[in-house]
Amino acid sequence: MHDFVEVTCPSCFQVFGVPAPSPLECPSDVDYDCEVCCRPLRISFWEEDGWVEGEAYGLGD
Ligand SMILES: [Zn+2]
C-alpha cells in the first residue's frame, strides 16, 4: 500500500501530497522540493496508529 501524506510548504503555504514511506521506516526525515514553488524543504514522517503522518519544514535559512 502506498500512502500519500498532505503537507504544507513552509515557503508558499500550499498543500501538496507526498508519497509516504513505510511505517517501518518511520520516524524519518527526507529532503523534498515543493511541488508548487519548487523550493527545497524537509519532511518529517512519523507513524501514528498504523498511519504515516508527515510535516514539512524549512531548511532553517
Ligand atoms: Zn512551496
Image (cartoon, helix red, strand yellow):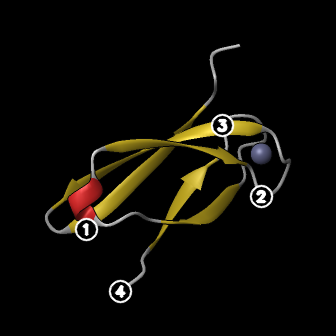
Q: Label 3, secondary structure: give it.
A: strand
Number of the label disc, if any, that sits on residue 1: 4
Residue farthest along the right direction in this orientation:
37
Look at mark 1 in the image and give the residue it sits on.
51
Labels 3 and 4: the sequence-earlier one: 4
Indicate the position of residue 14 as horizontal and vertical percent values.
72, 52
User: How many numbered tags mark residues here?
Assistant: 4
> Could you tell me the amino acid type at mark 2?
Glu
Q: Label 4, secondary structure: give it.
A: loop
Which image quarter: residue 9? top right
User: Tag 1: Cα neighbours inside 10 Å, few (<14), some, or many (≥20)?
Assistant: few
Indicate the position of residue 18 as horizontal and vertical percent values.
57, 64
Indicate the position of residue 1 as horizontal and vertical percent values.
35, 86
Number of the label disc, if any, that sits on residue 41: 3
Which image quarter: residue 58? top right
User: Tag 2: Cα neighbours inside 10 Å, few (<14), some, or many (≥20)?
Assistant: some
Gap between marks 4 and 1 measured at Cα: 11 Å
Residue in view at x 47 percent, y 45 percent: 55
Labels 2 and 4: the sequence-earlier one: 4
Look at mark 2 in the image and give the residue it sits on.
35
Label 3 lies in ligand 1 vicinity (Cβ under 8 Å) = yes
Q: Is residue 50 found left or right of 32 in the rendered image? A: left
Label 4 lies in ligand 1 vicinity (Cβ under 8 Å) = no
Q: Label 2, secondary structure: give it.
A: loop
Q: Label 1, secondary structure: give it.
A: strand
Q: Quadrant of the C terminus?
A: top right
Q: Nearer the viewer, residue 43 or 6?
A: 43
